Image (cartoon, rainbow, N blue to C red):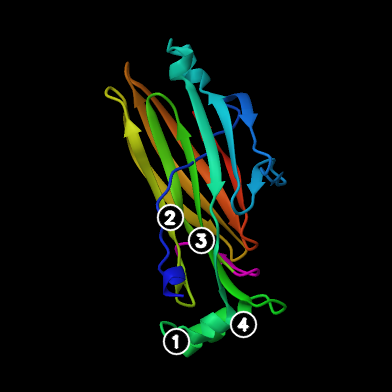
Amino acid sequence: MKALRDRALLGACATIAGAALVVLGAALPAQAGTTDSSGAATIAAGQSTTGTLVDPGCLSAGRAASDCTYTTGVSLGTPERSTRAQVLADPGLSAAQKSEILATASPNGTLAVSSNHWSQFVTGVAYTQTQNGTFYYNGSRVWVTQSYSGYTGSHACFTNYVVTGWTISNVSKSDSGSTTSRNLYCGWNVNQPAWITTSWSMTATVHTNGTISGAGATVG
């Protein structure tokens, strides 16, 4: 149980989409899941989805196509789960915390709380940007950076690498939404040679059933 409460894994992944991008193609594995009402891919545990996108602003600036083509993706790991009995036996939780988590867990099953690691990325020849983290869910509630019943997830947004002559700036992140879905946002500026600067962002949404949706990112 302590391992579940302390879970904070590192990883790499992301998604970019929107009117400002031209979609060259998307490669979805056999277990790519479904799409939500906005058309974003929704994947379950152990699944991933990727695509290839082109930044037309980069092309119009005279860059080679290879410099303006990006691979994007979203992935979800294998969940760690704790039963009602494990929650009751956990010495690290107070009686109030145990009562709270069990009260909101699904009443028809033995599971009390689960956690999973997710990641989202965009990568090209010049740089890779990632947001990732761990979220908790129990069938009726999902949470990330908020602490609930003694469990707290994590959210990071960072640059994996950037080539000389390019810089990444104004990196920001946020965790917003409700108890039934949380929106994980990562934004940044890409500063290219010749004074070309574009603003990028990507968003992923996690749900009470442990799935994640890659809500499109934008560049402009």
Identify which residue is drawn at 44% across, 83% down. 93
Mark 3–mark 1 Cα distance, whole angstroms, equals: 21 Å
The span from disc 3 to disc 4 (Cα, nearest Å) is: 19 Å
The CA span between labels 4 and 1 is 14 Å
Residue, disc 4 = 103
Q: Residues within 10 Å of mark 2 (few under 14, many from 20)?
A: many
Q: Which residues fall within the magenta stretch?
A: 138-145
Q: Earlier in the sequence, mark 4 or mark 1?
A: 1
Amino acid type at circle 4 is: Ala
**In the figure, 15 relative to 102: above or below?**
above
Q: Which residue is mark 3?
A: 135
Q: Helix or strand or loop: what does disc 1 sit on?
A: loop
What crowding class fits label 3: few (fewer than 14 Cα within 10 Å), some (14-19), or many (20 or more)? many
Q: Position of residue 39 (x, y in %)?
A: 69, 40
Closer to the chain start, of discs 3 and 1, is 1
What number is the disc on residue 181? none
Q: Which of the two discs, 2 and 1, labels the residue nearer the N terminus?
A: 1
Does residue 140 show up magenta in the picture? yes
Q: Is residue 192 or residue 47 the one in the foreground?
A: 47
Question: Which picture quadrant has residue 105?
Answer: bottom right
Q: Position of residue 205 (x, y in %)?
A: 58, 52
In the image, taking residue 26 as reference, residue 172 lies left or right, namely: left
- Residue at figure coordinates x 48%, y 19% from the top left: 57
| Label 2 sits on residue | 155
The reply to whether dot 2 and dot 1 touch (C-beta < 8 Å) is no
**How busy is the neighbourhood of tag 4: few (under 14 within 10 Å), some, or many (20 plus)?**
few
Can you identify the residue that label 1 sits on? 94
> Can residue 76 be seen?
yes
Q: Amino acid at mark 2?
A: His
Residue drawn at point x = 46 percent, y = 69 percent? 4
